[in-house]
Image (cartoon, rainbow, N blue to C red):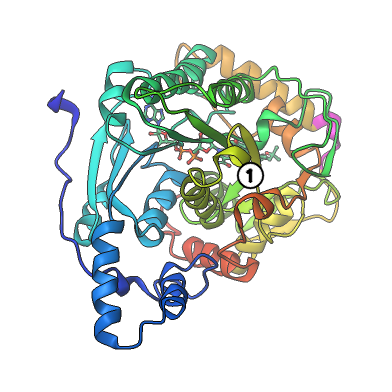
Amino acid sequence: MEGWRLVCSWNGHEGRSKRKGDYDESLADWPRKQEDSLSAAGLSSLGQWLQQDMADSAQAQKLVYLVTGGCGFLGEHVVRMLLQREPRLRELRIFDLQLGPWLEELKTGPVQVTAIQGDVTQAHEVIAAVAGAHVVIHAAGLVDVFGRASPETIHEVNVQGTKNVIEACVQTGTQFLVYTSSMEVVGPNVKGHPFYRGNEDTPYEAVHRHPYPHSKALAEQLVLKANGRKVRGGLPLVTCALRPTGIYGEGHQIMRDIYYQGLRLGGRLFRAIPASVEHGRVYVGNVAWMHVLVARELEQRAALMGGQVYFCYDESPYKSYEDFNMEFLGPCGLRLVGTHPLLPYWLLMLLAALNALLQWLLRPLLLYAPLLNPYTLAVANTTFTVSTNKAQRHFGYEPLFSWEDSRTRTIRWVQAMDGSAQ
Ligand SMILES: NC(=O)C1=CN([C@@H]2O[C@H](COP(=O)(O)OP(=O)(O)OC[C@H]3O[C@@H](n4cnc5c(N)ncnc54)[C@H](O)[C@@H]3O)[C@@H](O)[C@H]2O)C=CC1
Ligand SMILES: C[C@H](CCCC(C)(C)O)[C@H]1CC[C@H]2[C@@H]3[C@H](O)CC4=CC(=O)CC[C@]4(C)[C@H]3CC[C@]12C
């Protein structure tokens, strides 16, 4: 078993009050909560406060979390957010097919970080990683809408991988499971029906033909059905699913690809989607924050939150996919040409179909996987936006990052990209 467990493990418990002010804005700011309880308890002297603080810290640092897919785009943000915002953490396990070099920098922190190179499709590897964890955040997944992987592989990772995680929780006695689902489990559907400012209860005909949304929908159902199952020791499993819309922010590979595409085209991008088609987007830091909050609140609010789904949302504006990207790419020197799509929709469809044909023909020789294919065109061309406050009502979620912050952080990240590395 030790063969796949890598070395990145350390200890060093420091006073938790050092964390204060890590972020400027927080709604569930734990030191502030501590101060509130401090005054409530009527403790007067600094000495008493420090004693109490140390006792709380020693007692509080007891939880073991596991994040699958912890080295991916979202996973890395979840990992960093947990380390900054979950004071009760004793050990954080990061499970991924490929471990990132940035894990090294976590060595300086007070929490024991255990990096585990593993595959969610391998049940024994998942069981070993889950054993002893209090909470599992299952964010690992094969995110492929470009035809890079086969439908079988997508199913294996997203569905069988999720089954393995659920069974591992049941077998080892882990009681809390947070699943990273997707807006794609709802839609856009194959009929191109708009979902306009919908919420978790909005009726919508969810019909999936593409392997990715199909696999995410199956996996989400498995997770929700598992809620209430008895885990080892007899306690009930508590599960819930978070459904991000299109995530953006630091580390977003598609944004990177589009930026370089624009540079190659002389600083221009050509409008392909009507500006009136709204596409839901959410900042990665806020999605990560939602994961941290859900994981934290699941125990206390099991009856309310168990078996529930929550869209991930924040203050990001409703815009078309392309106009939204220009919020970041514009300040980095790119220009979106055209107020209307430059090509008629039927021609885009034809090009998308041609790309799909080329992909199929070239498959024995090389992998041809452009951004434009019939599926991505349909998704980009269908209004899908959410408007809900369910997360706020159920577990007090408020976005940690304002739209201004999210935008600034993303722009800074794009600006830091190497413009010559196209
Ligand atoms: N990127 C987006 O806009 C959205 C993503 N999601 C979901 O969020 C989750 C994370 O997505 P991203 O961070 O964008 O993708 P990503 O590809 O950056 O991260 C996924 C991580 O899972 C790991 N992984 C893949 N197969 C694995 C396996 N067999 N065993 C262990 N680890 C494996 C990858 O190595 C990667 O680090 C996924 O479940 C995805 O379906 C949901 C909605 C929107
Ligand atoms: C790549 C698409 C944009 C291409 C523009 C075109 C057709 C002119 O070339 C992206 C448009 C919408 C994106 C998807 C959407 O944000 C929802 C998603 C949710 C997920 O869970 C995974 C990612 C994705 C499917 C996302 C993928 C890229 C787009 C299709």
Q: Give how far across and how far down residue 78 sits, in percent.
A: 43, 49
Instruction: Say which residue appears at 61% left-offset and 57% top-offset.
Output: 396
Packing grade of label 1 (10 A; few <14, some 14-19, many >=20) is some
Quarter of image, ligand 2:
top right
Q: Give how far across and how far down residue 119 sits, in percent.
A: 33, 24
Q: Nearer the viewer, residue 147 or 342?
A: 147
Q: Decide if residue 255 is on the left or right side of residue 66.
A: right
- The magenta-colored residue range is 343-347
Q: Nearer the viewer, residue 148 or 39?
A: 39
Q: Is residue 404 above or below residue 44?
A: above
Q: Give how far across and how far down residue 332 sits, in percent.
A: 57, 66
Residue 286's image quarter? bottom right
Q: Is residue 242 visible?
A: no
Residue highlighted by disc 1: 246
User: From the Cβ of disc 1, is ligand 2 less than 8 Å away?
Assistant: yes
Instruction: Say which residue appears at 55% left-offset and 44% top-offset.
Output: 254
Q: Nearer the viewer, residue 391 or 159?
A: 391
